[in-house]
Amino acid sequence: MALIVQKYGGTSVANLDRIRKVAKRIIRVYSAGNDVVVVLSAMAGVTDSLIQLAHQITNDPNRRELDVLLATGEQTTVSLLCIMLESMGCPAISLLGHQAEIVTDRAFGQARIVGIHATRIKELLTRRKIVAVAGFQGRDQEGNITTLGRGGSDTSAVALAAALKADVCEIYTNVDGVYTTDPNLCKDAKKLHKIAYDEMLEMASLGAKVLQSRAVEFAKKFGVPVHVRSSFVEEEGTMVVEEEDMERLVVSGITYTKDEARITLTKVPDRPGIASTIFTRIAEAGIVVDMIIQNTRKGGLTDLTFTVPKDDYRKAMAIQKEVAKSIGAEQVLGDEHIAKVSVIGVGMRSHSGVAAKMFTVLAKENINITMISTSEIKISCVIEEKYTELAVRVLHHAFGLDSP
Ligand code: ASP
Ligand code: MG
């Protein structure tokens, strides 16, 4: 007998028919003798509509009240699931975030979990109840309802699995696992049986929307085995595990994002304080910078290039035009049509030559690399957006990911 935490995303509970299917799946696992804690998201689209509703009143809704509002999405699904389970003759009880004692800081809209007192859940499990916990929400020390940021029910599930020392945390989503690359772009993409926490983290932060990054951080910190799978099929998905449990592959996946834009300041005076001015202004505007490159040139002038989210591109350009004037830089150049292609794998820690291989593969296709950044387990190249698909396919092949 095992203790299993299952999380179902918005598409898996989008309507009563889906909720019925989910209930059947839960009953199967429960009837086999396992203890089951279920964490749910709101029905697909509901969180978005609630946000829109509040924004019809004002652009800047009161943050505490917005969390009270958003938490209703998950309240709806946990109660419906329990009504469904009970109607099928299965003992179930729903708990909202505060009832499950998921305690967070008080950063409304992006709260972090600081602790979970799982005594009530444990007691309910010993009474053989199926416990359905509303994902995405908790309460702060004063009892205010908080939410954990978009996609936050992944984090609720992993945190509960950690607190309960569950045997596994199953994340049911609308994809059936983590792939070597985007199957929509590359028909040879393969489902990975296993992926290391760090690889999953890189993939999540690079835009693979399978799991919320915070959930992966949590899983890694507490060693929670996470199983990403689909509620629409029976097959196993992908296990997110400790690095030691991985087979030694050098590269596990190729990702890409078209969500960034590039900004270059030319002929920037090369002296202390300049980079600080440039990036302080950007940070003050709440813009997150990703890659940064600075060259040294003769004559005390340098070019400085960085990337920002495409959504912030216009704002960032406007700011940099002012900054350029104030620091005496020559020009501000921008490019929205870029893509960042990344090669990810924990095997890179012990293999050299991965970067060289990546550059060679791209060069063979005549794809120009304009920026490069690396971490211990990732190499990213910025290229022209129109070559994204080609780059992903040739890299996928070159690193042997086509063959299972
Ligand atoms: N319902 C929330 C959202 O849409 C939380 C989640 O789905 O994980 O972001
Ligand atoms: Mg979601």
Image (tube, grey):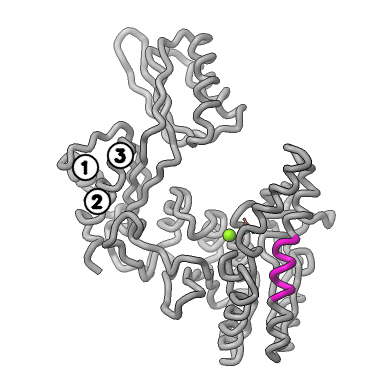
The percent position of residue 110, horizontal first and vertical second, equals 67, 49
Q: Is residue 344 above or below residue 238?
A: above
Q: In front: mark 3 or mark 1?
A: 3
* Circle 1 residue: 362
Residue 82 covered by magenta stretch: no
Q: Could you tell me which residue is drawn at 32 percent across and 53 percent down? A: 254
Query: Which residue sits at x=75%, y=46%?
Result: 54
Name the residue located 58 percent from the left edge and 80 percent from the top edge: 21
Mark 3 = which residue?
386
- Earlier-in-chain disc, 3 versus 1: 1
Q: Which quarter of the frame holds ligand 1?
A: bottom right
Type of the residue with mark 2: Leu
**Can residue 205 be seen in the rendering of this structure?**
yes
- Looking at the picture, tell me which residue is in the foreground, 156 or 390: 390
Quarter of the image with the C terminus is bottom left
Residue 43 in picture, x, y percent from top left: 64, 64
- Cβ of mark 1 under 8 Å from ligand 2: the answer is no
Image side of residue 287 versus residue 95, left or right: left
Most frequent secondary structure within the magenta stretch? helix
First to last magenta residue range: 72-80
In the image, taking residue 259 as reference, residue 54 lies left or right, namely right
The residue beneath circle 2 is 395
- Mark 3: give few (<14), some (14-19) or many (20+) Cα within 10 Å: few
